[in-house]
Image (cartoon, grey):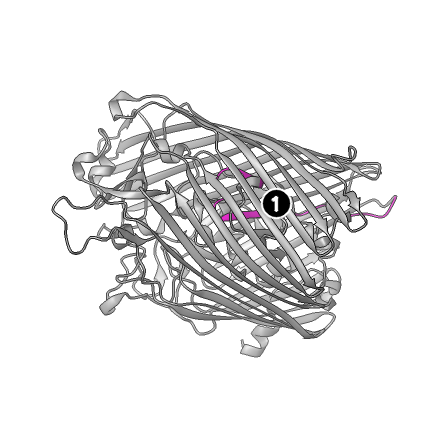
Amino acid sequence: MTSSAAIGLVAGVASADTLAADPATARPPAETNAPARLEADLDPEDVTARGGIVGQATSTVTARDMQERLARSTPEALRYEPGVFIQQSAHGQASAYVRGRTGQQTVLLFDGIRLNNASWRQGPNQYLFTVDPRTIGAIEVFRGGASTRFGSDAIGGAIAMTPLEPQEREAGERGAHPRAFGRYGSADDEWSLRVQNDFTLGSNGSALVGFSTRRVGLLRSGGPVFGDGGAPVLVPAFADDGRTQLGTGFGEVTADGRAVFRFGEDARIVAAAYVHRLFDVPRTDQCPAPYAPRSECLRVDEQFRTLAYVAYEDRLGALANRTRAVFSYQRQHERRTLRRPASAIENTGRDAVDTLGASWEATSEAFRLAPRAALTLKHGAEGYFDTLASRSWLAFTDIDVVRELSRGQYVEGSRYLQSGAFAEATLTRGDVALIAGARLGFVAASAPRDASSGTERVDASWWPTAAHATLRWRPAPEWTLLANVDRSFRAPNLDDLTARQQSGPGFLFENANLRPETTLGAEIGVRFEEGPHRAELWAFRSRTRDAIARSYRELGDCPPSTPACTASWSRYQLVNLLGDSTLDGLEASVQAAPWSWLRVRANVSFAYGDGPNPQPAPVLGGSDYAATVPLSRVPPLNGTIELRMAPTRASYASAGLRWATAQTRLAPTDYSDARIPLGGTPGFVVADVRAGVRIDRSAAVFGAIENVGDVAYRTHGSSINGAGRSLVIGFEFGW
C-alpha cells in the first residue's frame, strides 16, 4: 500500500455534517451523542459537563476528536490535551497524569459518578483503561485542585466522562438504528468490533445498547530504549527480533445499555449499566521481572468493572432550577496470578470492591441583584460506601498442593466511606465574576486485625475541608484574566492503610497510621478568544502538606508471612513526608482556524516538583544525602501539534506531532524502578497522520499511520515502549 493510499484511508468520521463543520465551532451531531444539558441556559463560559469550577483550566475532548485521533483506549484519547501526560504500566493499562499527578491524586468521573474507590492504587493505575471510549460522548479534563466540587483525591484535577446518549427522535418516530464499528491495528494485531442499536421506547423514551469485543496481540515497538552509557532498559523483555515486546497483549469484552425516559420539558430518568471485562493482561514489568526467567510472569487474569445507576434530573424551583440525583452500584474485581514455573509455584490473589453511591447536585436560577449583577448558587452532597473482599493463596504445582494465606493483598472485610457536602456561589457584575465555594467532608476507614500476618487493625476517620476562590475579569470581549486559589485534600484509602503488593520500584507494604495530605494551590491564567481562534496561558503552584510517598525499608522490616516482600530487590512503606512538597508549572495552548477548512492546535506543558527526602538523614551524615529531592515520575516538558484539513464535506486529513524532552530529575525510588532507564527517560518526537472519508451518511472508512518515523520511544515511567510504525484501519456502518 502506498503512503498516499494509506493516508486516504485514515481516521474515523461521525457524519457528513461533522466533517463539514467549522472545526473551531462545530458541535457533535446526534450521532456522536453530545448530551442535552440542563445547564444550557447559563452563560457558556460557566458551563462544564457535570460541573467543574468556573474559570478553572479546562479542556474538552469531543466524540469527533476521539474518532479522528483513533483512540485505542480512553487514556489515549487524552494524548493531545494540554497538561495531560499518558503513562502505561502495561499494554492493557494506562494512567493520565494531570499537572504531574495521577492515580489517587486525580478523580475519575463517569456521568458525574465517582469511580475512585478504596483500593485505588498510588501512582499510575489501570482504572481509566476500563472505560470503553466508544461509550463516551465527551471528556472534560479539569486541571488543578478540585476537591471543593469532587471531594477526596482531586489534588491534581479531575477527568469527567460524559456518556453516549440515545439519539433524539422526532415526535412519533419509531424503529431501530443499528450501527457497527471495526478497528485493526498492525502494531499489535488488534482486531475489535462494536455493534450498537439505538431505538425508541414508547412516545417519551429512547435507549442505546452496545456490545464490543477485541483481541490484542504482542506489541511491536520501534526497538529498545537506552539509558546513560547505552545501558538497555530492564523492562520490557523483547523477542528475538528486538522489536516485539513480551508481556503484552490481552482480550476484552464490554457491554452497555442506557435508557432515557422524559416527563414533560424538564424532567427525565436515566437508567444505565456498563460492563467492562479485561482478560489475561500481563503486567509488563513483571512478565518477566528483571533478571527473572522468561517463563515467569505476573498476569491480571481478570480485570472487571461493573457500573449500574439510576439518575433523576428536573427543575425543582429557584434554588434547584437544575438538579440531579443519582443512586449507583459499582464492582471492581481483580484476579492476578504470579507464575514461576522454574520454582513450581503460583501465587494467586483475588480482590473485589463493591461500592454503593448516592449523590445530589443542584444549581439555582440566576438571581438579579442589580441591572448588571447576578448571583448563582450551586450545592450538593454525596456518599460512597465501599466493602472490600480479598483472598490470596499459594499453589505448589509439582505436588498439587494449595495453601491459602491468612490475608490477601488487602484485608477481608475492610470498609471505607467517602462523603461530603459543598456549596458554591458565583457573583457576576459586568465584566467581573467572583466564584467561591467550600466543602466539609467525612471519611472513615476500618479493617480487621490479622495477627498471623502482622496486620494492625485500622479504625480511622477524618473531617477534611476544601475551599476555593476564583476571580474572573474580562477587560475586553476577547480577553479574560483569571486567578484561582484552592485548598484540596486526599484522605488515605484502604490501599494506603492495608495493602501489600508488588509495585514498579519493588514490594510496597502498608502504614496504618497515615494522615490525609492537603494541598494549597494558586494559579493565574489569561485567555484570548475571537471567533474560531483561542489561546490560553496558565502558571500554577501547589504546596502539599503531609504528602504520602514511598520510603525505603530493610529486609527485616518486612511484615511476617509475606514471602513476596523478602524475595524483592527493594522494599518500601508509605509515609507522610515531614515538610511541604511543591509542584510548579506552566501550560500554554493555541487553536487557530485561518480558513474554514483548516484548523491548527498546539500545546506545551511543564511541571517541576520537589519535596522532602522520604529517607531520614543518615546518622553519621554523608555528602550524597539531600534533604530535598525531586518528586517521583513528574512528566518532562512535553507538547503536541495538530493540523486538520477538511477540503470537502465528506473528507478530512490531519497530522499530529507528540514530543517530550528527557526527564533526568529522578526521585530516590525512581533509581530502583526498572521502568525508568539509567539516568532518566530519553526525549522523543513522534508523528502521526490521519484522514477519513464518508462514503454516504451511513458508512465511513478511516485509518491512521501512527509513529510514521518508526521511533523507539517510551513515556516517562512506562513499562512498555510506544508502538512502532503502525497502520490503523477502521470502518463505521449503520442504517
Residue 470 colored magenta?
Answer: no
The residue at 43%/71% (across/down) is 685
Residue 98 image point, x, y percent = 48, 53
**Residue occupying the point 27% across, 57% down:** 234
Name the chief secondary structure element in magenta: loop
What is the three-letter code of the residue carrying label 1? Phe
Quadrant into which the C terminus falls: bottom right
Which region is colored magenta? 149-171
Q: In this rendering, is residue 703 above or below 382?
A: below
Quarter of the image for the N terminus: give it.
bottom right
* Left or right: residue 231 compared with residue 258: left
Residue at point 38%, 62% (across, down):
714
Foreground pick, 331 / 149: 149
Against 106, residue 536 (above or below) is below
Reading the image, the residue beneath label 1 is 211
* 522 is higher (above) or lower (below) than 650: above
Depth order, front residue of 728/576: 576
Based on the picture, tell me whether residue 157 belongs to the magenta stretch.
Answer: yes
Q: Nearer the viewer, residue 129 or 460?
A: 460
From this viewpoint, is residue 275 visible?
A: no
The secondary element bearing badge 1 is classed as strand
| Picture quadrant where residue 454 is located | top left
Q: Is residue 693 visible?
A: yes
Residue sitting farthest toward the front: 370
